[in-house]
Amino acid sequence: MTVFGKVPEQGKPDYESALHWAEKAVDGGDADGMAIMAHLLMQGPDSIRDPEKGRELYGRAAAAGSVQGLYGYGLDLLGTAQNASERERGLSYIHKAAQGGFADAELTLGTVLEYEGGKDAQAFDHFMKAAEAGRSAAQMKVGIAYYQGRGVERDVSKAETWLRKAAQGGETEAIALVGDINLQGDGVTPNFPEAHSWYRRAAESGHAGAAVTLAQLIYNGMGCAADPVEAKKLLELAASHGNAAAKDLLQRFG
């Protein structure tokens, strides 16, 4: 069970009811219930928020061995750390959560190592564990690592495979990157129809850069019949998201 995942698409979250049932689980001594209640108190709406109590519950859940508690407590410690010692303490809890099989902890550790720089191989290992557990954000990280050869030998085929998985999980950037791979060819003939398809999916999901690239392809008739009207619509879409390149191209195209 993942507390920190996406809210289901169906229905509207009922935080008050969730808190009510989580509190019952806490009264019964359930460690995961403590983690759930802590999450609600720290991340829920203002009407139920109580960060101090949330931290206390995270600490209790972590002490009881809940991987969700370990992760939440570690994140809180990491976010409030004032020095290297406090930071390491927070990371130690996240490491324990990862050792307990909590995929989000693996993703966080990979992100921390990536941010530090010079630790691409270690970051890749954490991303891969989270990716194999189905975390779409980690699948995108793995795909990018393979494409760029960061922490692992470059492999465009594996890059596209993992980026496609991430795209299926709703990662808009991954959708655009699959378009890039098909457009660039990378040693083979570019697949314009496939690139068009992925860029359009990304653009429809709000990716302004993909809309700009697709507009340029369509305007110049690359892989399709030239269609300045459609190209302009795509640029206007990107410009509405604040994309500077789209605004510049609209001025030049007229």
Image: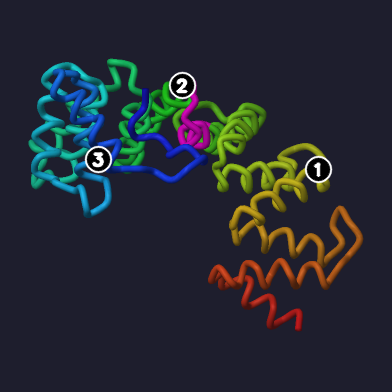
Q: Tag 2: Cα neighbours inside 10 Å, few (<14), some, or many (≥20)?
A: some
Question: Which residue corresponds to the image point at 12% horizontal and 31% vertical from the top-left?
Answer: 57
User: Which numbered disc, 1 or 2, marks the residue that appears first in the sequence?
Assistant: 2
> Between marks 1 and 2, how big is the CA–CA gap?
31 Å
- Residue lying furthest right: 225
| Position of residue 28 in the picture relative to residue 244 (left or right) | left
User: Which numbered disc, 1 or 3, marks the residue that appears first in the sequence?
Assistant: 3
Q: What is the magenta segment's predominant secondary structure?
A: helix
Q: Tag 1: Cα neighbours inside 10 Å, few (<14), some, or many (≥20)?
A: some
Q: Amino acid at mark 3?
A: Leu
In the image shown, does 43 or 20 lie closer to the viewer?
A: 20
Read off the magenta span.
Answer: 132-142
In the image shown, does 203 or 25 lie closer to the viewer?
A: 25
- Front tag of 3 and 2: 3
Q: Amino acid at mark 1?
A: Asn
> Between marks 3 and 2, how big is the CA–CA gap?
24 Å
| Position of residue 143 in the picture relative to residue 197 (left or right) | left
Q: Amino acid at mark 2?
A: Ala
Q: Which residue is mark 2?
A: 133
Q: Secondary structure at mark 1?
A: loop
Q: Which residue is mark 1?
A: 191
Give x and y (percent) for residue 90: 16, 33
Q: Taking 44 as reference, is 214 above or below it? A: below
